[in-house]
Structure formats: C-alpha cells, structure tokens
Image: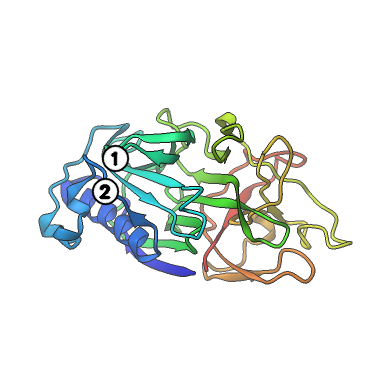
C-alpha cells in the first residue's frame, strides 16, 4: 500500500497555476502506483521524457466546463490481467472561471487512442463551488493497486473534493473480480452543470451486466446498522457505503460517511477506524469543510462528511 500527500493550489487563474495542480495530481498517481498507459493523444506534458518538469509543460487553461488534456491509467493488482480497470483522467476547468476541474471515468479497456471500452462508468467531475485560491492545501492519495483514494484541497471550504474507486471485496476485505464501486463527494457538484455533490456507481466486470445504475446515483447507499452481533459500523455515526449490485454487497470501505456533528472536533490528521468486531483497523483522512445534507435518509437533515481511506 502506498500513500502520498502534496500541497497544491486549486487555481486555474493562469496557465502556470493550472499546470502546477495538474502536474501535481499526475505525479501523485504515479507515486502511489496507478500507472500510466500509452494512448495516442495522451497529454505529452506528463510523459516520462518530460520528467514532470514544469518548464516542459505547455498546457493552457481550458474554457469553463472543458477538459482538454487527458491521460489513461490502470490498476496494478493481480486481477488486472484478467479483469482490467482503466481510469481516464481529464484535466480542465470546472463550472466557473478559474475553477479547477478533474474529470474521471472508469472503463474495462482502452482502444489505444484515448477511448475507454468495455463496461464504462458515468464520468465524475471534481470541482469547487467557490473561486480559486492561490494558497496551497493538502491533497492526499493512496492505493494498493486494487483501489484508489483521492482527497483534494483538504481544509478549504467549498473547494474540497473526494473520490474513491475500488474492486468489490469479500466479507474479509479481499478484492474480487465482480466489479468496482465508485464514490465521490465534490464541493462544486459532480456534473458539468455543477449539480449533484454526491456520486456513487457500481460497474460490474464484463459479462455481468455493466453499470448499476446506468447513470450514477446522487446519494450514497448507506444504512444505520446495529452495534451488536458483529454488524458493520460499531459506531452509529460512521456509515459504510454499500455497492449497489442489485442488492447491497459487502462495503469496500474506501469511503465512509459520517455525521459531521459527531466528529467536528477532530483534526485533519489520519485516524484509525475499526469497522466491525475483530477486523483490522484501517486508516482514514478527512476534511471538515465539505459538509453536505444530501445523503440518504433516515436523518438527512444532519450534516454529513466523508472519511477517505489513506493507507
């Protein structure tokens, strides 16, 4: 498992600031082991030949709701050879002048020229709901080859975004080939119209039905569970997100929902959470500036936030 943190500024006010955060994200993905594929049309600025050197980056800021530059990356676990997962990262501008914008789409294959093939997900956009900042903020990335966790610009109100994708797992957290679960919480919405701050979608492997639902759902599939008999969620304030495979499958626990009022006093530092009796603790990171009340019932009036796995 690999983790990486870097301070970046969520700023598209100039070509230089756009290039800086985009190159920072690309570097982070490589560092945690989400490797880059060779696709015709990939953003050459991020190529190994350029050594991630800002002096070699020539990208210019796209117009609002435009994602001009892309690269395709892949999982690196033992299942990748038989059940591949590819991720298309598109760097651009969100729904506002100078707003950062990162669009991510999953596919089961690639045609070698930038198009994802096989079963694909709905595209998810990470973007702010407020004007750009020249100040740098913590960004966190982690992966074990079968999952990826991203938390952008922690600590900045109305700007932070979180994204996780991981293979479905067994009851003991062992990744399997059934499909992937994708979750996101974006301050500025996960669409080009800056709506739907919540994104969740399950995408099955080839031959098993494709995406469910066909368009990403705008609420997380969570449930308040009992705290006895080894049920998920010993603390009622921490809620796993269940893949919607037609029923609620085992949660991968790459992202957790929690009631913000329950954890309003903890810092941004990583915290260890044991999800059920006898389980191995996992490490999570969070930001207390991305509260939303657009989660599932039964108590949707509460403000919620997310923990993102970081180990």
Task: Name the foreground residue: 256 vs 203.
Answer: 203
Q: Is residue 283 left or right of residue 153?
A: right
Task: Name the foreground residue: 241 vs 116.
Answer: 116
Q: Is residue 31 left or right of residue 264?
A: left
What x and y, as percent, mark residue 247?
74, 38
Q: Which residue is mark 2?
A: 38
Q: Is residue 167 left or right of residue 11?
A: right
* Residue 139 in view here: yes
User: Of the residues under marks 2 and 1, which one precedes in the sequence?
Assistant: 2
What x and y, as percent, mark residue 94?
34, 37
Q: Residue at x 54, y 37 (%)?
A: 206
Within the image, what quadrant is residue 69 found in?
A: top left
Q: Residue at x 21, y 51 (%)?
A: 19
Within the image, what quadrant is residue 188 found in?
A: top left
- The residue most toward the right is 229
Task: Name the foreground residue: 85 vs 58.
Answer: 85
Which numbered dot is residue 65?
none
Density class for disc 2 (Cα within 10 Å; few <14, some 14-19, many ≥20) is: some
Within the image, what quadrant is residue 211 found in?
A: top right
Q: Secondary structure at mark 1?
A: loop
What x and y, as percent, mark residue 87?
40, 46
Q: Is residue 224 above or below residue 113?
A: below
Q: Secondary structure at mark 2?
A: loop
- Between marks 2 and 1, how big is the CA–CA gap? 7 Å
* Residue 129 in view here: no
Q: Which residue is mark 1?
A: 112
Q: Residue at x 46, y 34 (%)?
A: 118
Q: Are marks 2 and 1 in contact (CB under 8 Å)?
A: yes
């Amino acid at each position: 498992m690999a983790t990486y943190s870097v301070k970046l500024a969520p700023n598209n006010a100039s070509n230089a600031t756009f290039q800086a955060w985009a190159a920072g994200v690309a570097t982070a993905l490589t560092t945690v082991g989400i490797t880059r594929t060779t696709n015709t049309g990939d953003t050459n600025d991020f190529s190994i030949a350029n050594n991630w050197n800002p002096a070699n980056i020539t990208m210019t800021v796209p117009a609002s709701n435009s994602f001009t530059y892309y690269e395709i990356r892949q999982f690196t676990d033992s299942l990748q050879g038989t059940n591949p997962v590819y991720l298309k990262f598109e760097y651009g501008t969100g729904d506002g002048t100078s707003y950062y914008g990162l669009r991510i789409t999953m596919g089961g294959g690639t045609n070698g020229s930038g198009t994802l093939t096989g079963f694909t997900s709905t595209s998810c956009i990470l973007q702010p709901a407020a004007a750009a900042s020249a100040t740098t903020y913590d960004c966190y990335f982690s992966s074990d080859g079968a999952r990826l966790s991203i938390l952008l610009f922690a600590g900045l109100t109305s700007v932070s975004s979180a994204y996780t994708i991981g293979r479905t797992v067994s009851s003991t957290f062992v990744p399997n080939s059934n499909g992937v679960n994708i979750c996101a919480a974006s301050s500025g919405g996960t669409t080009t119209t800056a709506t739907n701050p919540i994104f969740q979608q399950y995408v099955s492997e080839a031959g098993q039905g494709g995406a469910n639902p066909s368009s990403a759902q705008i609420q997380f599939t969570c449930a308040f569970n009992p705290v006895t008999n080894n049920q998920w969620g010993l603390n009622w304030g921490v809620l796993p997100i269940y893949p919607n495979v037609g029923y609620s499958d085992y949660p991968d626990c790459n992202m957790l929902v929690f009631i913000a009022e329950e954890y309003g006093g903890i810092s941004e530092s990583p915290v260890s959470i044991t999800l059920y009796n006898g389980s191995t603790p996992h490490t999570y990171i969070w930001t207390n500036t991305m509260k939303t009340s657009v989660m599932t019932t039964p108590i949707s009036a509460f403000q919620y936030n997310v923990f993102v796995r970081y180990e």
